[in-house]
Image: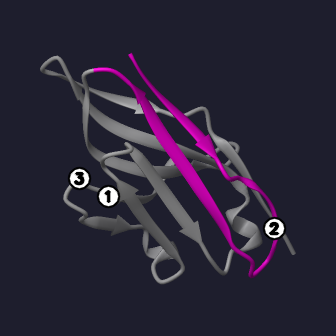
Amino acid sequence: QVQLVESGGGLVQAGGSLRLSCAASGSSFSINVMGWYRQAPGKQRELVATITSGGSTNYADSVKGRFTISRDNAKNTVWLQMNSLKPEETTVYYCNADVLRFFSRKQYWGQGTQVTVSS
């Protein structure tokens, strides 16, 4: 089994910054893509940013230039640096990992971390 543990959410004023962290733990696994998603109440979960094991990144248009995703493969950890946050980005952020374990591929999700941006 693989577990994803997130941290770093909280309350920040509009225009402020937060840094989210997500660490994967378990045994005998490798991770291809890691990413961050967010889901507002009553809405579908949406992609924020992803990063491959090789360092290729992908961002939602709405966060380009403000958010930066990074990763440490050795530590199985991914970060999301969020700058110039907007009140409408208040929601729960989820970490995701595309895990290969014992020749089986599976998606794992973290428990979610709340980000609140006050106006």
User: Residue, x 25% and y 27% (percent of image)?
Assistant: 29
Q: Position of residue 68 (x, y in %)?
A: 47, 71
Closer to viewer: mark 1 or mark 3: 3
> Which residue position holds label 1?
51
Secondary-structure class at tag 2:
strand
Residue 17 visible to the viewer = yes
The amino acid beneath tag 3 is Ser
User: Residue, x 73% and y 59% (percent of image)?
Assistant: 90
- Left/right of residue 96 with respect to residue 55 in the rendered view: right
User: Residue, x 55% and y 68% (percent of image)?
Assistant: 81
- Left/right of residue 32 with respect to residue 103 in the rendered view: right
Q: Position of residue 24 (x, y in %)?
A: 43, 35
Q: Describe the colour scheme in one phrase.
A: one colour
Label 1 to label 2: alpha-carbon separation: 25 Å
Q: Position of residue 76 (x, y in %)?
A: 37, 42
* CB-based contact (under 8 Å), mark 2 and mark 3: no
The number of numbered discs placed on residues in the rendered structure image is 3
The amino acid beneath tag 2 is Val
Q: Is residue 66 above or below residue 9?
A: below
Circle 1 residues within 10 Å: few <14, some 14–19, many ≥20: many
Closer to viewer: mark 2 or mark 3: 3
Q: Position of residue 31 (x, y in %)?
A: 27, 39
User: Residue, x 87% and y 75% (percent of image)?
Assistant: 119
Residue 44 visible to the viewer = no
Label 1 to label 3: alpha-carbon separation: 7 Å
> Which residue position holds label 2?
12
- Left/right of residue 100 with respect to residue 82 in the rendered view: left
> Which residue position holds label 3?
53
The amino acid beneath tag 1 is Ile
Secondary-structure class at tag 1:
strand
Q: Which stretch appears magenta?
A: 1-27
Label 2 to label 3: alpha-carbon separation: 30 Å
